[in-house]
Amino acid sequence: MNPTSIAPGQTLLIDADDTLWENNIYFERAIASFISCLNHHSYSPVEVRNALNEVERETIRQRGYGLVSFQHSLITCFERLSTEPVTPEKHEQIVSFAHAIRDQEIELLEGVADILPELAARHRLILMTKGNETEQSDKLARSGLGQYFAAVEIPREKNPDAYHAVCQKYELERQTSWMIGNSPKSDINPALAAGLNAVFIKHAYTWVLEHEEVDTAREGQHMVELESFSQLTSHF
């Protein structure tokens, strides 16, 4: 695809966590602290992490995403693996891991502060990020990026149905609409399945539950892989 062939006036749906700002690295630090806190003598750190992944899948189905769900997963995993009860002191320690994420300052990824205004001047930007609506709205407010988006969508899940709904709501032409994000599972593959174009921006610490093989764009679609947000201006 020739980058110069993409005309102004496209609609760019842009993910937030690990696309605009750092997110998963803070969860990884919290999980490392949790594994150290558990200090299991029968399970290796890798086995504890795999057990936590399974608990998180269950929690997401029941409670959705967000820090409260993450905190619930940590406590549940501790209860399942530990031979000791969750004492009030241990509970407070586990909760503190989630609170450390909540209190983290927003750290924009390289190039976002400079590139996003340029993109907004040439295209219509819609923030599309899944998760807890209150938490995601708060992060957007603290990021200072809200002014560049014509609309904000925070669905419970980013699946083909969610993309179809956004296309219908904003009357998007699929051939001139793009989903931009770091997650194959939530950003790229379901957007392609819904008939949109996609831009996969790799992130070294994308959450393991978001890993999938990236689908191939169908005839008439475009899928671009980039190493950084800054490279978007070479295409848009």
Image (cartoon, rainbow, N blue to C red):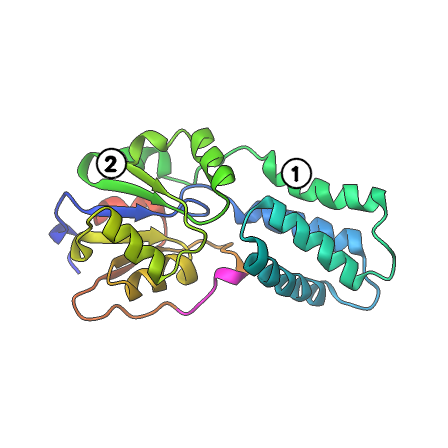
- Height in image: 177 above or below 123? below
Please name whichever residue, 213 or 96, is drawn nearer the observer in this view of the structure: 96
- Residue 123 seen anywhere in this rendered image of the structure: yes
Name the kind of residue labelled 1 in the image. Answer: His
Query: Picture coordinates of residue 232 (x, y %)?
Result: 27, 47
Q: Magenta segment, which residues? A: 209-213
Q: Mark 1 = which residue? A: 99
For disc 1, the neighbor class at 10 Å (few under 14, some 14 to 19, many from 20) is some
- Height in image: 138 above or below 208? above
Q: Which of marks 2 and 1 is nearer the N terminus?
A: 1
Name the kind of residue labelled 2 in the image. Answer: Ala
Residue at 24 percent across and 63 percent down: it is: 195
Q: Which of marks 2 and 1 is in front?
A: 1
Asked if the stretch drawn in magenta spans residue 151, the answer is: no
- Height in image: 70 above or below 188? above
Q: Residue 120 carries which label?
A: 2
